Image (cartoon, rainbow, N blue to C red):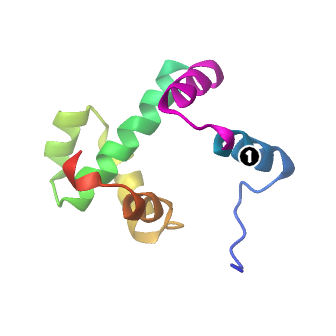
Amino acid sequence: MSEYKSKLECEEMDFLIECIKSLETKEEFYRFFEDVCTVYEVKAIEQRLQVAKMLMERRTYLDIASTTGASTATISRVNRSLNYGCQGYKTVFDRVDWKSK
């Protein structure tokens, strides 16, 4: 068992995770996130994933910014998470075919 303790860990977050884990289809995910989040919030997460993908492809900050519209501050934050974070991006990228997306 991992000794990792998240700064986010709490009963309410556990409930959120259980709710997300209960979703089974792409349509259910779309419906859930459309109800729970604003379009801007979902787009911000989507953008960070694209930035992470492009950083892993060794693309430049200028290229990433012009392609995604992300600020250099966002790109730097994602880069810091990739290099020194909790391995969240690594976990999901190890499980999906991110190179063909």
In the picture provided, is 34 more to the left or to the right than 82?
right
Task: Identify the image quadrant of the C terminus.
Answer: top left
In the picture provided, is 33 more to the left or to the right than 99?
right
Considering depth in this image, is 81 or 101 the residue closer to the camera?
Answer: 101
Q: Would you name the residue on which mark 1 appears?
A: 18
Q: Residue at x 15, y 54 (%)?
A: 59
The location of residue 95, given as percent across then percent down, is: 41, 60
Q: How many marks?
A: 1
Considering depth in this image, is 16 or 48 the residue closer to the camera?
Answer: 16
User: Which amino acid, mark 1?
Assistant: Glu
Q: Residue at x 37, y 55 (%)?
A: 96
Q: Residue at x 71, y 59 (%)?
A: 7
Q: Against 1, is 79 above or below?
A: above
The location of residue 8, given as percent across then percent down, is: 72, 54
Q: Give the secondary structure at mark 1.
A: helix
The location of residue 82, given as percent across then percent down, is: 39, 63
In the picture provided, is 60 more to the left or to the right than 12?
left
Q: Which residues are magenta?
A: 22-37
Q: Residue at x 68, y 41 (%)?
A: 22
Task: Identify the image quadrant of the N terminus.
Answer: bottom right
Q: Against 79, is 29 above or below?
A: above
Q: Quadrant of residue 62?
A: top left
Q: Against 101, is 86 above or below?
A: below
The location of residue 29, given as percent across then percent down, is: 55, 31
- Residue located farthest toward the right when viewing the structure as drawn: 11
Q: Residues within 10 Å of mark 1 (few under 14, many from 20)?
A: few
Q: Main secondary structure of the magenta part?
A: helix
Is residue 18 one of those drawn in magenta? no
In the picture provided, is 89 more to the left or to the right than 29?
left
- Residue located farthest toward the front when viewing the structure as drawn: 24
